[in-house]
Amino acid sequence: MQEYRSKEIYGDLYENEDKPLVVILGGSRAGLPTNLSEKLLEYLKNDYSVLLLAYFGVGDLPESLEMVPVEYFINAINFIKQKNKIADDQVIIIGQSKGGEVALLLSNYIESAITIACVAGCYVFQGLPNDLFSLNKIEPKSSWSFNKQELPYIKFYYDQSVLNDAKNKNFCSCYEKSIEKNYNEDALININNYKGKILFLSAENDKYWPSKKMSNILIENSKNNSNMTHISLNLEGHYFLNYEQSVNEIINYLKENKLKLD
């Protein structure tokens, strides 16, 4: 395993010569993807090169999940592709939660063969400061930026009921009310031009945000949804890179859509 610890790329690479590349993006926890299933990692390491990529909260990366440059992902992935001579159609991006949001967003910026969006959002949302309960005291920012400009986003809406839910670790009402009260059509992630395949994995009982509904919104609004599959699982949390049921779905999908080397 090779460690990269720079502003340009902060990740762990399990190199597998002459194999396709899988890039794994975690959620709203800082640093490298956490709670990653050993079963999933071992499966991937046998058939792919695997890059576990951090994007905030560690090293010289942005301190919080606010205004994270899309260019960081583009440059980091391209660096590994070029170093290992991996073609665009040999790249798979797997993102969980906020990582699923940016995985879908990246379909507008880089070519890849497969995107697996686990409990992902269909919108760009307001970024997350280190202290979530400081939201009412700080200037809102987008989660992501490009060319140093924030991407259009949906601002958080919160009232007392939303705050009470958040204290009980139920954040879904915040996102639902934010979509209702602060809707921004420009924040909807466009996946129309993506030529690869997309697997959406959502949670029936999602307490973080309405991942099932948002996955359906993207599919229903896409002009090219024949390449999309949506599986909703009877799960509550967001650690889809760790739960046995979701991990099995990921592995089965990759087996069914095995990339063939040129």
Image (spheres, rainbow, N blue to C red):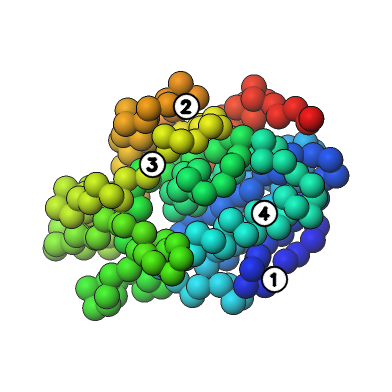
Residue 134 location in percent, x, y? 29, 75
Label 4 to label 3: alpha-carbon separation: 22 Å
Q: Would you name the residue on which mark 4 appears?
A: 78
Query: Quick check: marks 2 and 1 in contact, CB under 8 Å?
Result: no
The front one of 111 and 258 is 111
Q: What kind of residue is marked 4?
A: Asn
Of the two numbered discs 2 and 4 in the rendering, the one whose residue sits closer to the viewer: 4
Residue 226, placed above or below residue 59? above
**Which numbered disc covers residue 5?**
1
Circle 2 is placed at which residue position?
A: 228
Please state the horizontal and vertical placement of residue 73, each as a whole percent of the image: 57, 57
Query: In what element is the residue under mark 4?
Result: helix
Q: Which residue is mark 3?
A: 190
Q: Residues within 10 Å of mark 2 (few under 14, many from 20)?
A: some
Asked if residue 139 lies left or right of residue 39, the reply is left
- For residue 30, say whether it is visible: no
| Residue in the image at 80% along x and 50% along y | 84
Residue 129 in view, yes or no: yes
